Image: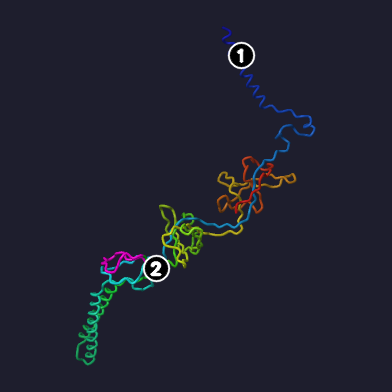
Amino acid sequence: MASKFLYPVVAVVGIAAASGAAWWYQHRQPAASSADVAQGREAGPGATGGPARPVTVEASRVQIMKLSDDAQAVGSLRSRQGVMLRPEVSGRITQLNFRDGERVRKGQLLVQLDDQLPQAQVKQSQAELSIALANHKRNQELLAQNFVSQRSLDESAANLEVAQAKLALAQATAARLKIVAPFDGIAGIRNVNVGDYLKDGTDIVNLEDIDTVYVDYRLPERYQTQLRPGQKASVELDALPGRRFEAQVQAVDPLIDANGRSIGVRASIVNQKLQLRPGMFARVTTVFGVRDKARVIPEEAIVPQGGRQFVIRLVPGAEPDSLVSQRVEVKVGIRRPGQVEILEGLKEGDTVVTAGQQRLQRDGSPVKVLELSRPAS
C-alpha cells in the first residue's frame, strides 16, 4: 500500500531536480581564466567590457546622377484634324476628283453630285433678279419725274429683295451638291464610285491632316497639379521599335474621370515624314522636371518604420579605420527600379548599409563592409 504513494513522490522529486539542474546549466556564467583576469576582461565572446565582434554587411555610397521626374502612360495617336466626308442631300455622283491616299488642298472639289436641276433654278433666279433690278431702276427714274408714286417704288424694291433671296437660295442648294475639302490633308480609301446614288449622311471618304498628330492619354488624378501645357513628353510606339519621338503637351482636360479617377492629356508630335498614323498604340512618358544633381542610393538601403524612412549610415569609429552604424531618418523623392532619390538626411559620398540591417539593432555597433556596391546608372 505504501509503495503506491512512494513511486509518484519519487517521480515528482526526480522531475523537479532535473528541471532545476537544466535551469542552472543554462544560466551559469563560465569562470574567468587567470589570463583573462590578468588582462582585465572576462572570458567568453560578447562579455561585458570586451570588444564586440564587427557585424559583416554590404554597403553602397550615395551617388550623384541626373534624374527626371516623370510618369508613364499608354495612349493612342489621332489626326490633328480628321473628318468623314458625307453629303448633306441625296444625289447621284457625277464626278470624283481625287484618288485614294492622295493629298488634297482646302477648298478642292472632291465629289460632285448631279446638279442639273439646281443649276437651272439658279439661272431662273438670275433672270428674275435682272427683271426686278430693271423695274426698280425704272421706278426710281419715274419717281424723280413724279410719274409714279412712292408706293410703286417700294414695291419694286421689295420685289428686288425677293429675287435676290431666291437666287441665294438656288445657289446654296446647288453648292450643297459639291463636296469640297474643309482643310489640307490626305484622302483615305473611298467607299463610293461614279454613278452611285447617295442618301444624305452616307460615308464617302475620310480626310486626315497628319502633318502633326496628337497623342491622347490619361494619368492618375494625383498628377493634375503637375500637368501644364508646354511640358515635354517622350513617345515610343510598338509599330516603330527602337525609335522615340518628342511630344509637347497641348491641353489638359479640366474634368477628372469619376470612374477611373484619371485626367485626360493631349500632346502633339511633329510628323513631317508622315511615319506616324492615327490609331497607333503609344507609350508616353511625361516629364515634369529634371534634377541634374540628385542623390541616389539603392532601394534596399531604405528601412521603413512607423510611416517613416530610415537608412543605416556608416561613420568612423573610435578605432583607426573602423566603422560603426548610425541610424538616420531620410526623406525620399523619385523612385526608379532599384534606386531611390534622397532629398534630406544624406550627402554625396555617405556610405549606407544595403544588406545586414537586421543585425544592427543599436547605433555605434562595429561594422565590417563585405562588399561596397554602386547604384545602377
Q: Quadrant of the N terminus?
A: top right
Q: Which residue was labeled with disc 1?
A: 10
Q: How many marks?
A: 2
Which amino acid, by three-letter code, is at mark 1? Val
Q: Is residue 227 left or right of residue 111?
A: right
**Residue at x 65%, y 43% (from the top left corner):** 57
Q: Is residue 152 magenta?
A: no
Which amino acid, by three-letter code, is at mark 2? Ile
Q: Is residue 197 magenta?
A: yes
Q: Which residue was labeled with disc 2?
A: 186
Q: Give the image quarter of residue 171.
A: bottom left
| Range shown magenta | 189-207
Question: Regarding mark 2 in the picture, which secondary structure is present there?
Answer: strand
Q: Give the image quarter of residue 113.
A: bottom left
Q: Is the residue 302 above or below the residue 11 in the image?
A: below
Question: Regarding mark 1 in the picture, which secondary structure is present there?
Answer: helix
As rendered, which of 329 and 215 lies closer to the eye?
215
